[in-house]
């Protein structure tokens, strides 16, 4: 079965204005449960737009979005927000950790917001941090961690509530090649270890080659 289905998605910005741009022109894509798919395209091709639509942060002009087989089109705003919070984890190029909280607390907080009991949230956070090798640094604030460590903490935070689908937008884009490699390996360990599906936008072909499948975004379509 599919964790995410995008069917004939179109999306443009600034209709009728000189700045009008048609970004997606009938993009279709499925990500199966447990599958890790690389989304490869040059800057400006519409990768972020596609991820935002798949993660219910933005709506398409036309086309269908299904999460875990469930049609998202007819839902109320409230139901969409619930689906986004429960079903999807996001990872960005810049991690946006809360600076005044420790690594552990950054992974605990979204779980408390989701209704998880504090002891269980701490145990889950520690387990995730250990999976990516930052367990020993769990009590440090982000400023005391290296860039690669901060990004690994951000991965744990995105997966804290156990979403079925991970959407990542250039997750190693701001890291040097050696750190990027290490951080990517940690991300794959997390995704494989939790059995979740992932759609990962990157322009790093070496990283893309280590995923299950590569799709390209070309002229607003997935090829
Ligand atoms: P990518 O992630 O592949 O770099 P984006 O999805 O960010 O591509 O952007 C695709 C195109 O859509 C670009 O030309 C960008 O300038 C334009 N775009 C993205 N978001 C907006 C917006 N909110 N308003 C107007 N244009 C936008
Ligand atoms: P990188 O070059 O990979 O970004 P850094 O040189 O920033 O790494 O950090 C190297 C190691 O030192 C990392 O394990 C990091 O967590 C630790 N570190 C850096 N700054 C601090 C600090 N202010 N307090 C404690 N540990 C730190």
Image (spheres, rainbow, N blue to C red):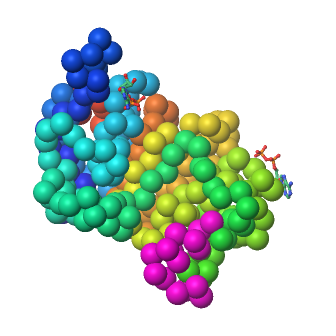
Q: Which image quadrant is residue 63 in?
A: top left
| Magenta stretch in the rendered image | 106-120
Asked if the stretch drawn in magenta spans residue 108, the answer is: yes
- Residue 117's place in the image compared with 111, above or below, is below
Q: Which image quadrant is residue 72 in?
A: bottom left
- Of 35 and 17, nearer the camera is 17
Asked if the stretch drawn in magenta spans residue 136, the answer is: no
The quadrant of the image that shows the C terminus is top left
Where's residue 191, x and y in %? 45, 61
**In the visual, does 203 lie left or right of 133?**
left
Q: How many labels does the image show?
A: 0
Is any atom of residue 92 visible in this view?
yes
**In the visual, does 29 lie left or right of 48?**
left
- Residue 26's place in the image compared with 115, above or below, is above
Is any atom of residue 29 visible in this view?
no
Residue occupying the far front of the picture: 17
Per the picture, the main secondary structure of the magenta-coloured stretch is helix
* Residue appearing at x 56%, y 37% in the figure: 173
- Residue 14's place in the image compared with 32, above or below, is above
* Residue appearing at x 67%, y 71% in the figure: 104
* Residue appearing at x 71%, y 57% in the figure: 99
The quarter of the rendering in which ligand 1 is drawn is top left
Where's residue 177, x and y in %? 64, 36
- Of 36 and 221, nearer the camera is 221
**In the visual, does 176 lie left or right of 29?**
right
Where's residue 106, x and y in %? 63, 66
Where's residue 81, x and y in %? 32, 61
């Amino acid at each position: 079965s599919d964790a995410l289905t995008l069917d004939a998605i179109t999306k443009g910005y600034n209709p009728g204005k000189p700045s009008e741009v048609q970004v997606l022109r009938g993009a279709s894509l499925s990500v199966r449960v447990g599958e890790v798919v690389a989304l490869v395209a040059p800057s400006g091709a519409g990768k972020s737009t596609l991820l935002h639509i798949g993660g219910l942060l933005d709506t398409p002009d036309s086309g269908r979005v299904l999460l875990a087989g469930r049609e998202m089109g007819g839902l109320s705003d409230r139901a969409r927000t619930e689906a986004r919070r429960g079903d999807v984890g996001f990872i960005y190029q810049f991690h946006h950790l809360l600076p005044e909280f420790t690594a552990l607390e950054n992974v605990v907080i979204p779980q408390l917001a989701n209704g998880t009991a504090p002891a269980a949230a701490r145990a889950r956070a520690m387990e995730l941090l250990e999976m990516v090798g930052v367990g020993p640094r769990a009590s440090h604030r982000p400023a005391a961690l290296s860039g690669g460590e901060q990004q690994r903490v951000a991965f744990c935070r995105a997966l804290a509530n156990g979403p079925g689908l991970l959407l990542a937008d250039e997750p190693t884009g701001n890291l040097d090649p050696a750190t990027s490699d290490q951080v990517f390996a940690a991300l794959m360990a997390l995704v494989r270890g939790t059995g979740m599906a992932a759609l990962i936008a990157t322009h790093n072909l070496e990283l893309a080659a280590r995923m299950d499948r590569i799709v390209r975004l070309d002229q607003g379509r997935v090829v």
